[in-house]
Image (cartoon, rainbow, N blue to C red):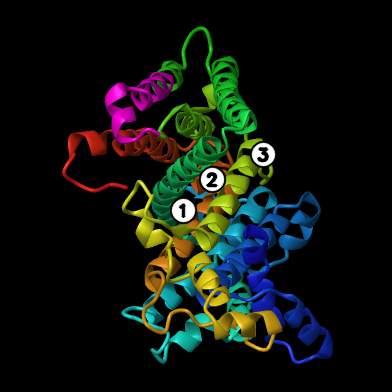
Amino acid sequence: MGAVLGLCSAAQLACCCGSAACSLCCSACPSCANSTSTRLMYAVMLLLVMIAACITLAPGLQNELKKVPFCENSTSVPIPGDLKVDCNNAVGYLAVYRICFAACLFFVLMALITIGVKSSKDPRAGIQNGFWGIKYLLVIGGIIGAFFIPEGQFASTWMVFGMIGGFCFIVIQLILIIDFAHTWAETWVSNYEESQSRGWYAALLCAMLTCFALALTGVVLLYVFYTKSSGCDLSKFFISFNLILVLIASGISILPSVQERQPRSGLLQSSVVSLYVIYLTWSALTNASAACNGITGGQSSFDKQSIIGLVIWACSVLYSSIRTASSSSKITMSEHILAKEGSGGQGGLIANEEGGDGGEAGRSGDEPKVFDNEGEGVAYSWTFFHVVFALATLYIMMTLTNWYNPRSELSKENMASMWIKITSSWLCVGLYIWTLVAPALFPNREFN
């Protein structure tokens, strides 16, 4: 099913072309729901923006980027705090800021346009689900225009928006990861219970041990590279405290009272959450004081921590585009992020394939490859979807620029960013523990 959904955006894009080659490509693509293909198309757009931003950080482009309009006079414009932007080092980061600024404004505009849309019968549905060529031209034009924004206080001001938006997306990403952990564990446990195959049991055990092993390895490496025998007490506290938190969460997941309410809850979910919490701790410590993070100033680039952040971000974006919010979702918030099961995504596709004449038409290939499944009601909140993607743009901006502070001469030290990330790690553990204990604390409420 995942492979089928992965081709939906290709079907929608191919069907926009009029050539014979595009028509042939369109006919080869499977049918899928409009709600799924549209989300995937926006995800592709966001991924392309990320790639464009990554390209500006390539070392070979630094000299060429110094010729862009915002960089020519930037050294003569001071930033508050008597620090001047040095385009010799920061030009890549400043270019990323402008690319993401244009993309973020696009998604904000789409969020405003789609406010109050209830079904695809709304005249604004065409704007949401079509006009892809115009949308790409708007984003490209916006990026070109953003390069003409004079530096001045743009970077320092936009960084504040980036940190706030980045934190908000981290919270959303936490919800998606916890939902993924529960879905993964429940699917494999269900397969094991139905088949009684030792293969599924071995897979569960190996996945759990691997995640815990990686988390433990991460803790050891954090102590080695981000602490010193004397000093760095705050870093030591963060590592130790988060290690204690994930151990507590893992213990809670196997308590009898929790297992009674959620028999499929266990250590696999805890291992995934633990691994992500350790990653957030690592990310936070990279923005700690320069004496403890072991990183000095240099040219704009992104490191291993940023690459891992990009992979997690891309997976979260694609997961939110393909996944449907089923009745087994443990977090109510996920119902607003993901499409409703049975209305969009997989539910709509299955209904079309099994629906009598519609199914015959699907097998004959005569019906549109992307069919409308939102005539009676939208499968997800269009406005909230674009807000999430606007926040995702801000998060990727901060990740690519290492949560760069324009006042710090390219040092990764940024105490505000450090506290944002470490707070999000605590919030992650809190959300996960809540999904475990809520059914036991409120037995009269339905959580499944």
Question: Which marked residue is nearer to the observer: mark 1 or mark 3?
Answer: 3
Instruction: Give the x, y percent position of residue 74.
Output: 59, 60
> Given the image, on which type of amino acid does mark 1 rest?
Met
User: What residue range appears in magenta?
Assistant: 242-263
In the rendered structure, the answer to whether residue 367 lies left or right of residue 258 reads right
Mark 2–mark 1 CB contact (< 8 Å): yes
Numbered circles on residues, count: 3
Instruction: Give the x, y percent position of residue 27.
Output: 74, 82
Instruction: Give the x, y percent position of residue 82.
Output: 47, 47
Q: Against 201, is 352 above or below?
A: below
Q: Quadrant of residue 25?
A: bottom right
Q: Quadrant of residue 178?
A: top left
Q: CA distance from mark 3 to mark 2?
A: 13 Å
> Given the image, on which type of amino acid does mark 3 rest?
Asp
Q: Quadrant of residue 444?
A: top left
Q: Say which element carries label 3.
A: loop
Instruction: Please name the residue shown 62% across and 60% down the image.
Output: 1
Query: Which of disc 3 and disc 1 is earlier in sequence?
Result: 1
Query: Which of disc 1 and disc 2 is earlier in sequence?
Result: 1
Instruction: Please name the residue shown 44% across and 20% down the image.
Output: 243
- Which numbered dot is residue 404? 2
Circle 3 residue: 303
Q: Tell me the crowding category of disc 1: few under 14, some 14 to 19, or many 20 or more residues within 10 angstroms, Cα based.
A: many
- Is 242 or 399 nearer to us in this picture? 242
Can residue 33 be seen in this snapshot? no
Q: Against 336, is 295 above or below?
A: above
> Given the image, on which type of amino acid does mark 2 rest?
Tyr
Circle 1 residue: 159
Q: CA distance from mark 2 to mark 1?
A: 8 Å
